[in-house]
Amino acid sequence: MKPLYWTRIQIKDSRDDQMSTIWESLDEPSIQDAEEFEELFSKATMKEVKKPLSDTYQKTNKTKKIVKLLDGKRSQTVGILISSLHLEMKDIQQAVLNLDNSIVDLETLQALYDNRAQAEELAKIRKYYEKSKEEEIKLLDKPEQFLYELSQIPNFPERTHCIIFQSVFMEGICTIRRKVGNVLHLSKSLTDQQNVKIVLGLVLAFGNHMNGGNRTRGQADGFGLEILPKLKDVKSRDNQISLVDFVASYYLHHFDKDAGTDKSVYPLPEPQELLRASQVKFEDLRKDLRKLKKDLEACEKEIKLVCQKSSEQELQPFKEKMEAFIQDAKNDTTVEEAHLEESQKSFEDTISFFGVKPKPGEKEITPNYIFMLWFEFCTDFKNTWKRESKNISKER
């Protein structure tokens, strides 16, 4: 049982004739269902601590010379790996044959794959095993024994590579999906959200008022987005506020009926989303998708090879799980290719919507150019919006 570290009171030691205590008349009940109590409050059983994998290889007699087949640096690298693995070879085999990462995680599988015996090394080690007696095999150094046992796992390189690629693919396709989705979401937000139009309308109205009867700048119906980040530099006469401060404050007082309350909603895209979208390059995403598809084809060939070489007992669950993964992965790449085209089309529609033209000497307008303009403006606007919202809240 777990100990209870209390301070013991004994009546015969603490009795005071002038004052009785609760302990003198308190009955101690017998415990019902003691087994349940013991189960709940028993000490936790110690989890089996496995020895480093290196300790499972028989220690060689010091008087006999250890046989080394690997060069010094390679032997040291493999030795460090097996000393760090608190596993048994059967755990590794279980993970590889059953695609089970609960005991051997993907990082460990990657290390095992990277350090597996190469063809020339394996040929030497196998030759030694074939011509040597049992006592001579025991003299073989630990790294060589380890690499040999690893090679005995059926189709270890191909199976492990497929398991690792499955994780790499999922991570890669999720990254593409997130980036493409972010650009698509922001493109639609900038063109469709009513609040964005209201804010731009305010900028246009105040800008036209400031430009008055100017022949080249006055009576504008729109404006180039490159002015947005510069609004913070347009200061009031007393230099106390900027034009972006005034626009944000005016929006809150005249267009946001919930201003100063929890229901008030920031009217523009979030600056951090715009910053992430500004880093997207459509051509890079296409390259990433092409590489994933190419690697997926190579993985599919490896899966077929494993299935051809595997015995009936070793075929499942590898065949079933990997074939399902390949089918899902093919569907994912098809969906993301279409998603990417939709996202780029939506971005181009956004450019047209705001009448943006490429910079002199440039052929196209990039997400970096558009979204950075909006990022700077939205950051300035949000700072004022938050500050003014607090002021309105206090007034309320």
Image: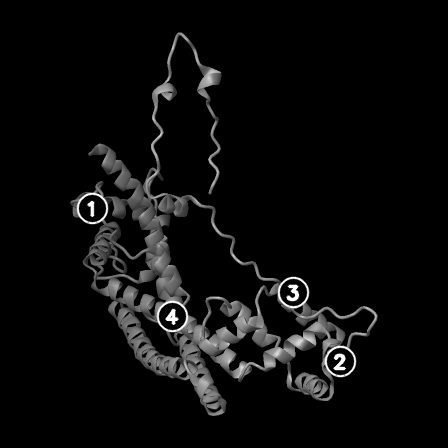
Residue 172 image offset from top left, x and y in percent: 42, 73
Which residue lies under the disc numbered 3? 83
In this rendering, the label closer to the viewer, 2 or 4: 2
User: Residue 356 falls in which quadrant of the image?
Assistant: bottom left
Is residue 366 in sight in this rendering?
no
Q: Is the residue 230 above or below the residue 18 in the image?
A: below
Residue 240 image label: none
> How far is the residue under mark 1 from the one under mark 3?
58 Å
Q: Which element is circle 3 on?
A: helix
Q: Which mark is residue 136?
A: 2
Q: Residue at x 81, y 68 (%)?
A: 62
Q: Nearer the viewer, residue 212 or 166?
A: 166
Of the two numbered discs 3 and 4 in the rendering, the one whose residue sits closer to the viewer: 3
Q: CA distance from mark 2 to mark 3?
A: 23 Å
Residue labelled with disc 4: 174
- Residue furthest bottom in the image: 308
Label 1 crowd bin: few (<14), some (14–19), many (20+), radius 10 Å? few
Residue 156 placement (x, y as % from top left): 54, 81
Quadrant of residue 325 within the rendered picture: bottom left
Q: Give me the residue at 24% from left, 33% from top.
A: 394
- Residue under the image location 34 percent in, 44 percent down: 235
Mark 1 or mark 3: which is in front? 3
Q: Position of residue 236 (x, y in %)?
A: 32, 42
Q: In the rendered structure, which amino acid carries the disc numbered 3?
A: Ser
Separation (CA) of disc 3 from disc 4: 35 Å
Q: Which mark is residue 263?
A: 1
**In terms of sequence position, does the residue under pointer 1 or pointer 3 come before the other?**
3
Q: CA distance from mark 2 to mark 4?
A: 52 Å
- Tag 1: residue type? Lys
